[in-house]
Structure formats: structure tokens, C-alpha cells
Amino acid sequence: MSRSRTPHTPPKSHYRMRTKLIHGTSPTKRWDYDHHVIPPLSSSTTFRLSSVHRGVEGFIDFGSEDVPLERKVPIYIYDRLDEPTRGMLEENLALAEEGEICVAFSTGMAAIAAALGVCVAGGEEIIAHEQLYGSTYSLLTSWLPRYGIQTRWCDLRKPDALRRCATPASRVVYFETPTNPSLELIDIADIRRQVDALNHERAESERLHIIVDNTFATPYCQRPLALGADLVAQSLTKDIGGFGTDMGGAVIGPRSFYNLLMAYRKDFGGVLSPKNAWSILVYGLPTLAARMANQQKTALKVAQFLESHPRVEQVFYPGLESFPQKELAHRQMVSYDGKFAPGSLVYFILQDAPGSSRAGDHLVDYVAEHAYTITLAVSLGHIKTLIENPYSMTHFNLPPEKKQTTGIHPGGIRLSVGLEDWHDIIDDLRAALEAC
Ligand SMILES: *Cc1c(COP(=O)(O)O)cnc(C)c1O
């Protein structure tokens, strides 16, 4: 006699994030791919509408607050509005960052511009931490002022920073943590407490919002939304894409921002191409946890090796015992399974005359010529280890005074640790340090 079995499908929440990054929100209303193991790569700029009525419905649905997202079977009209492959990636990125929604852009910069664009208007202000990604800095200093949006620079590591920096016109607190390149941390939960205290006295329309660029940590190492951020911006070009093949960006946050972000993207046009979305959906995001776990193990070994080398003056890596903000690092940088997750970037300074970049430049040139495992290139978060000198390369357009106050040393070296065997990376670094 066979016993009848009650079918049992455990809820998605039962599964661990490493599993969820591989299977995503499948099945999804975005596409019926019940018979595909790999989601299809969609490539259609426009979509057949079976009737005028359906077209009208599609336009009404786009930007409507009335249809709950989870019940929404999208009516696709035109790629720039919405599209299935990118839509599937957006669902999975929202899951990865523990947010409700995600809107994907052509690059990280398009995502950052949109996150800011939906939160501030002319006559209002942004409060930003002093150390920022180079293009974000020039967006804030060369472009936004033309639209009447000014930025106040504030050292957000200091307690009570916002009480001193916020004005009635402030609408956004913007920062990266860890910062680029010197890997200083900003306490997201503490910024949330400071913003709550200020918002308490403000009308709804004048509230401050917290935007965190989470590119350096990736959602594997840190979930800013869970720590109190309102929006997260990501460059998908870096660790989430992971293989260095495609550019992309994303904004993740609560449902209340979805229509604004979608409308902004429709009109400014920086939409993520479905072909790029597909490779990030199929190769990048599903392997994020496996790559990050390995890269950060190697990063710690590399950082410890550098710290022990007599030619090295100082090493910054949140996983080192000597890291100045060690307590915060352990509290804030935590992987999905609750373990300390200090990331895959290392910043270090060689012994040299004060203010000189000679030793650093020499080492990077030696590596560029001789190292098999380390490539001189900008960008970061790839399976290949990359090295660069931020002072003269990625942070070139920061004024020298600003570089000095934010700890960007002329000879400082940024290393983005890849997936190579750690012995080989250390051997190449040792050879370079000994030759210089
Ligand atoms: C690369 C990067 C960006 C910009 O991303 P793109 O995809 O190159 O536009 C923004 N912020 C940080 C921290 C980055 O590393």
C-alpha cells in the first residue's frame, strides 16, 4: 500500500543566499522559461501588441502605483521602458541586496546619476563624504551645479557629522563604504540614526535620504539597505559582473522608488542593454558568492604578506588586525552566512620620501612588465588581479589638497585581488618588491 504524500515546496526564504543567487526568483512572471535551464537572451527593441487596448494598458501599467509588483505580468512595449531579460536580472539583484526593487542602468555612473536625480532638485543640496569615486566627484562638482544642485563635503566618519553639515536644503547623504581607494569605513547604521534625528523635525518632502555606493563591498560582503540606507547604487561592471566583459549599473531600494527610477531611466535613457543584462544574469550574479569567498581569502593572505614586507610602509585592508576601524568592519561587513567579509580590495603604500610617488610608480611599472598574475589596469572586481595607482589614474581629477586630506597618497597602490592561486600572486608581488 502506498502512502499518499503531501507535496511540499519549502518557501524561498528557506534557502541560503548562495543557492538563491544561482536560481534567482525563478519561476518568474517576467518570462515563461519553464523549459529553459538558462534564461533566454532576449533581443527585441520593440514588442508586438495584440490590440490597441493592450498597448494602452501597457502604457497605463508603466508607472502605475496601483498594480502590486509581485502580481504584475508586465506588458512589454519598448526596450527602454521594460524588457524581460533585464527584468529577471533586476529581480535577482533586488534579492541579492535584500531590497524590494531594482532598476538597472547602462553603467554604474548612470545608476548613481539616477539615484541622485530622483532624490534632489534644483536649489537643494547633497551631503557627500570627502572621498569618492572619480567620476562621481566630477558629476557632483561639474554637472549637478549646472542644475542648481550643490554638494557639501563632510567627513562622515566623525560622530555627529550630519548635525554639523546638514542644512535645511540637504536632501541626500551620499557615500561609499569602504571608500575608494583607501578603504575607510563609514558606519551606515550610525548615519541612519543621525538622519532619523534630523528627519524627525522635517516635513515629508524635505526628508534626507541615504544613498550608498556598494560597489566595493558587493552585497556579498555588506547589505546597506538592511543597515539603514534608503537606496543602494552598484556598478555591475565590477564584482557583480565579475568577468570584465560588460558594463552595467543598478539602483536597489524600496518599492516607493520604483516608478520614479523607471521614469527617470525612460527619459534620461541610460538603460542596461539586455545582452549585457544576460551575461550578468547568467554568469556574474550566480557566481558572486563563490568568487567573493575565494577572492577575499586571497586578499587577506596578500594583505598579511604585504604588511610583513620591509619595503611596505602601510597596508589598508578591513580584514587585517591592524585595521584602524576593526570593530566597525566586523559589525558591518558580514557575508550572507554571518561571517566577517572584508572584501577583495587592498590598498598599500611603499616606503619612500614624503610626498613621493617614485617607489609606487616603480613597483607598478615592474608589475606591468613582469608579473604574470597581476595586470596594470583600472577597474576592479574581476577574476584577474588588477593593480593601479589611484593618485595619478582613477583619482586624477581630484584636486591635490583633497587627495591629501582624504589619504590618497601619491605612491599609494590599489590591488583588486582576483581568483588566481594566492601563492602565485604573492610570488609576483615579492619579486616586484625585491626588484624595486
Ligand atoms: C566603477 C565604479 C563606479 C562607476 O561604475 P561604471 O560601471 O564604471 O560606470 C562607481 N563607483 C565605484 C565605487 C566604482 O568602483
Image (cartoon, grey):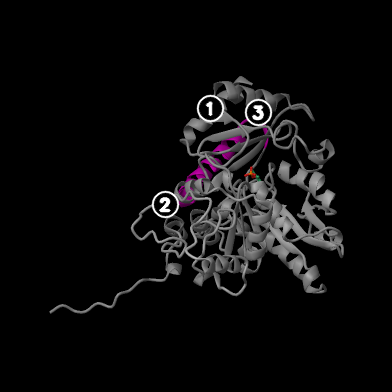
The disc labelled 3 sits on which kind of residue?
A: Arg
Please determine whether, in this image, residue 97 is positioned above or below residue 1.
Answer: above
Disc on the earlier residue, 1 or 3: 3
Stretch of the chain drawn in magenta: 285-314
Name the residue rendered at 63%, 66% in the picture. 63
Q: In front: mark 1 or mark 3? A: 1
Q: Position of residue 394 (x, y in %)?
A: 70, 36
Q: Please name the residue that numbered disc 1 is placed on.
A: 428
Q: Let me know if residue 288 is in the magenta part.
A: yes
Name the residue rendered at 53%, 69% in the picture. 53
Q: Please name the residue that numbered disc 3 is placed on.
A: 311
Q: Which mark is residue 83?
A: none
Q: Quadrant of ligand 1?
A: top right
| Circles 3 and 2 in contact, beta carbons < 8 Å | no
Q: Position of residue 363 (x, y in %)?
A: 64, 25
The disc labelled 1 sits on which kind of residue?
A: Asp
Q: Please name the residue that numbered disc 2 is placed on.
A: 40
Query: How would you classify the magenta stretch by its main secondary structure?
Result: helix
Q: Is residue 15 left or right of residue 182?
A: left
Q: In front: mark 1 or mark 2? A: 2
Out of 274 and 26, give the one closest to the viewer. 274
SS state under label 3? loop
Disc on the earlier residue, 3 or 2: 2
Report the Cα–Cα distance between label 1 and label 2. 41 Å
The disc labelled 2 sits on which kind of residue?
A: Pro
Out of 133 and 39, give the one closest to the viewer. 39
Report the Cα–Cα distance between label 1 and label 3. 15 Å
